[in-house]
Amino acid sequence: MFKTKYILLVIGFILIALSCDNLDITSEQSKTFTKIFGSAGSDIGNDVKEFNGGYIILTTKQLDTECSEIVLLQTNNYGNPKSNGVDTLSSLRGGNNTASKLLLTQDGGFIVLGTVEDTLNNNTDIYINKFSSDFTSEWEKYIGTNANEVGNAIKKANTGYIITGSTDSDENGNGGKDIYLVKISETGDVEREEYLGFTSDDYSSDIIPIDNGYIIIGTTNLPDKGSEITFIKTNLSGTSYDVTTYGGTNNDYGTTMVKTEDNGYIIVGNLEEDAGGNSNIKLIKVDEGLRNIIWNRDIGGTALNDEAFEIVKSNGGFIIIGTKELASGPAAYFLKIDDESGETILENTYGGYGQTIYSIEKTYDGGFIMIGSSGTTGNEMIYLVKVNSEGEL
């Protein structure tokens, strides 16, 4: 029997914009907390990492329908934003700019990944900014063609970094959008580009390094089947690859994946549950060859909208985060599953009036830090949650 907890958040205060540190909070209170902060418009928390005794948060700030910015925030260990810890990274570029991921680097710094709009050429480029441990920008790069490129995930490679996203440049002649794979050096210089896809639109959402190559997960749109979850296994050069797709009668979308202790993989995605566009969470475990399904689960309620965005390892299983629709509205979702069976071990929800979690990171004390948004579409605020190892506040 698994445990289910529905936690109604009573937030005693809301940090508007960038408040000063709360010096009255005790060390015990820093172990778990909920914070909501932002300013006029829409603020989305895209990624979070534990860093230098506090947290760094990567956000997208929507100013209006034609302008958004990539914003980097620093908080202390209690989740309170530092008054001097703000860096708007994309304001000089103009247009709609969106944040994607943070990556901690081996030299004690970190990398910001996002997508920026070139308003002069009317296209988008992948944006990368490398910071040192003292939050000083060391280099900044824009990667793309004359078409539109989007950066969704970045990981450490054997040397340098590997980035995956999408492009509509049609370099491989297949038509539509293609998966865009970019290998860069330690200083951000492009070493190799690959264009992968079918004859319709293809998107990638995550990538994981494996022995002698990479596995990309994403979505492909097949003319006779609709959208399906896609795996692409490549060699280190990206020149040889094997494609596997999974899907049912409705559209399926791949979001992320993780390698298991028995050398299999758990695929996380979302599937359309009905013609109304409501979605359920899709979990598939496959063996090392990626083709044999060990178990397959659909999680969610009828005529409700449940989605998953990330997965991390946890003692005795894996944690999946996202959003779960309750009677009161969307709630942030924390689901723990067993690796061998895929069965639910425990689940927690937080809020129930417009909360979504997009990213989760295990913390040094054994708990988890999570980031997302709270509020209605177009009026969201950054939603930061610190829980213990069982997902409890």
Image (cartoon, rainbow, N blue to C red):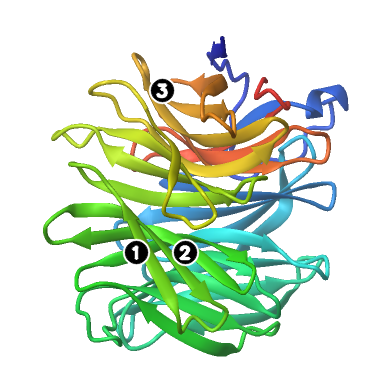
Q: Residue furthest right?
A: 27
Q: Is residue 367 visible?
A: yes
- For label 1, count other residues whose C-alpha is less than 10 Å away and answer few (under 14), some (14-19) or many (20+): many
Q: Position of residue 278 (x, y in %)?
A: 24, 33
Relative vertical location of residue 199 with respect to residue 48 in this rendering, above or below = below
Question: Extreme top residue here?
Answer: 1
Secondary structure at badge 1 equals strand
Percent position (x, y) of residue 326? 37, 18
Tell me the quarter of the image containing the N terminus.
top right
Up the image or down, 274 lies above or below 50; here it is above
Label 1 sits on residue = 203
Q: Which residue is mark 2?
A: 216
Find residue 260 and name its label: none
Depth check, front residue: 339 or 14? 339
Sooner in the amino-acid sequence: mark 1 or mark 3 = 1
Would you name the residue on which mark 3 appears?
Answer: 353
Mark 1 to mark 3: distance in Å?
30 Å
Q: Amino acid at mark 2?
A: Ile
Q: Can the viewer see residue 385 in this picture?
A: no
Q: Residue at x 88, y 27 (%)?
A: 27
Question: Disc 1 residue type?
Answer: Tyr
Say which residue appears at 25% left-offset and 72% top-offset.
198
Which residue occupies 28% across, 61% down? Answer: 220
Q: Which residue is more in the foreground, 28 or 15?
A: 28
